[in-house]
Image (cartoon, rainbow, N blue to C red):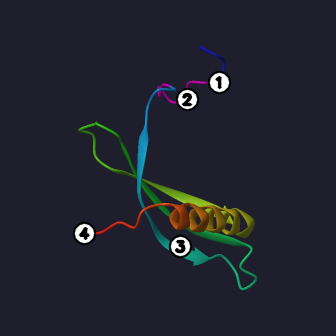
Amino acid sequence: MEPGSERRGASAEEEWEMLTLRGLAMTDETASEFTGTLVIHRVASPEPVESVRVRIKRSVLEELGGAVKRLLARSVPFTR
């Protein structure tokens, strides 16, 4: 195993599922950063969901928004 590949007892093989991003809000009127709570769960684990407070730069949200828009445009729409 490479140095730094383990953190807090977590192995590199663990897979996490992002459930939602709650309460995304501006940190100031310039909107250069946003804060929220990332809600995640370890796949196939009976352990409860974890909530992690996050701070996200505007540039990251813009990049993520563009990537998600392109991905959704190429995928088959989800129907219930």
| Residue occupied by mark 3 | 24
| Residue occupied by mark 1 | 4
Q: Could you tell which of marks 3 and 1 lies nearer the N-terminus?
A: 1
Numbered mark located on residue 7 in the image: 2
Looking at the rendered structure, the secondary structure element under dot 4 is: loop
Q: Residue at x 42, y 62 (%)?
A: 76
Q: Could you tell which of marks 4 and 1 lies nearer the N-terminus?
A: 1
Numbered mark located on residue 80 in the image: 4
> In the rendered view, would you say 15 is above or below 78?
above
Disc 3 marks a residue whose amino acid type is Leu
As for residue 79 lying within the magenta part, the answer is: no
Q: Could you tell which of marks 4 and 3 lies nearer the N-terminus?
A: 3
Q: Are marks 2 and 1 in contact (CB under 8 Å)?
A: yes
Q: Which residues are magenta?
A: 5-11
Looking at the rendered structure, the secondary structure element under dot 2 is: loop
Q: Are marks 4 and 1 in contact (CB under 8 Å)?
A: no
Disc 2 marks a residue whose amino acid type is Arg
As for residue 8 lying within the magenta part, the answer is: yes
Question: Alpha carbon of mark 2 to alpha carbon of mark 1: how far?
Answer: 7 Å
Q: Position of residue 68 (x, y in %)?
A: 57, 63
